[in-house]
Amino acid sequence: MERSGIPQRFPVALPDWWTLSVVIIALIMLLPVLMILASLLTSTSDAWGHLASTVLPEYVRNSLALMVGVGLGVLFIGISTAWLVSGCEFWGRRWFEWLLLLPLAAPAYILAYVYTDTLEYFGPVQTALRNWFGWQRATDYWFPSIRSLGGAILLFSLTLYPYVYLLARVAFSEQSTATLEASRSLGCNPWRSFRSVALPLARPAIAVGTALALMETLNDFGTVDYFSVPTFTTGIYRTWFGMGDRPAAVQFSAVLLLFIFSLVLLEQSSRRQARYYQVMSRTMAQSRYRLTGLRLLAAWLTCFCPCCWAAAARQSFAGHDPAQRRRHP
């Protein structure tokens, strides 16, 4: 249709305020990453070649070891506790369902102080062992090194497993009751039903929780510095504030971003392989395996040990000076 000899044009659809706001927020969140990537193209460091040949391999090894160790730790603790509180029935289950989230309220470096004070030479554990067995010196017995890579892996696992636990618990709770009952009718015992049916259906949620825990591990500075484990975060801090070489610190940050991008790609790959699971009917409650005897004791200890660590941290850390902890050998 024409008016005054000028063809009428279709109106142009403008983005609404909601879409525009989301784009602006996304750009603000991406600004630090874009600045790091832009600095790689505009700034260079004369010391980068020396740092890359001396300390970078150690940073890569320790970061990879942390990722593998913490990944296995949070998977084991998070999946086992999530299945116990969502698929099993035992005394204290309703309490543990929320108590297992307690480590999220305690920072990792505070748990590091508690972990060290508890297990060091003058701590209550080794002191009790010396009193029980009559040992007099540290050479009379062997005890694992506390402030080490293994200690950092254990501590991160006890602190970050709630990421996997929370998402896995929701995934287990929302699975179809009919699917689980069908596996039981086909002769699957509780362990086989969990391994063959429940766990594969919850894989996408577990992958997301593991990726979040590993990202927290890679960006942590206080814990790895306290345990004397050099990683990318400690390398960035020492290069920037110790050597005063900001371009080299930016380049270390760029390498750390590669680790983060690899985690994101792995998480997306896991979701492509298993994206769907059935949702439980709201009118049919999910039946749980009732645990008794030794199984009840094992389930109770499995849920109690992870959550009691964060509760003990607040009590042990109160009234202590963190500066004195750094003077411990």
Image (tube, rainbow, N blue to C red):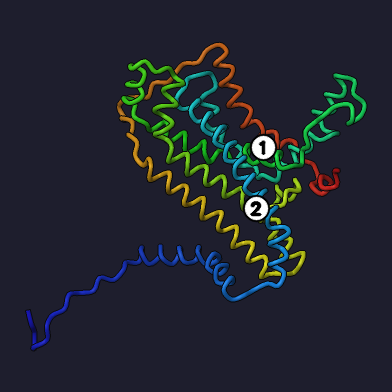
The residue that label 2 is drawn on is 60
Picture coordinates of residue 266 (x, y %)? Answer: 47, 48
Three-letter code for the amino acid on which mark 1 is drawn:
Leu
- Which quarter of the rendering shows the C terminus? top right
Q: Identify which residue is drawn at 42% across, 41% down.
A: 204
- Which class describes the residues within 10 Å of circle 2: few (<14), some (14-19), or many (20+)? some
Left or right, 71 with respect to 110, comes to left
Frontmost residue, 56 versus 229 = 56
Name the residue located 65 percent from the left edge and 36 percent from the top edge: 310
The image position of residue 41, as x and y in percent, is 57, 73
Mark 2 or mark 1: which is in front?
2
The residue that disc 1 covers is 154
Does residue 3 sit above or below 65 in this rendering?
below
Which residue is drawn at the image coordinates 59% and 76% (left, top)?
A: 42
Q: Residues within 10 Å of mark 1 (few under 14, many from 20)?
A: some
The residue at the far front in this view is 53
Mark with earlier residue (2, 1): 2
Q: Residue 70 versus residue 117: which sits nearer the camera?
A: 70
* Residue 109 placement, left or right of 145: left
Q: Nearer the viewer, residue 99 or 88?
A: 88
Q: Does 230 appear above or below 41?
A: above
The quarter of the picture where residue 70 lies is: top right
Q: Position of residue 314 (x, y in %)?
A: 70, 38
> Residue extending furthest top?
293
Residue 80: image location, x then y, percent: 53, 28
Numbered-mark total:
2
Instruction: Determine the residue located farthest toward the right in the rendered image.
Output: 136
Mark number, residue 182: none
Q: Report the amino acid beneath label 2.
A: Val
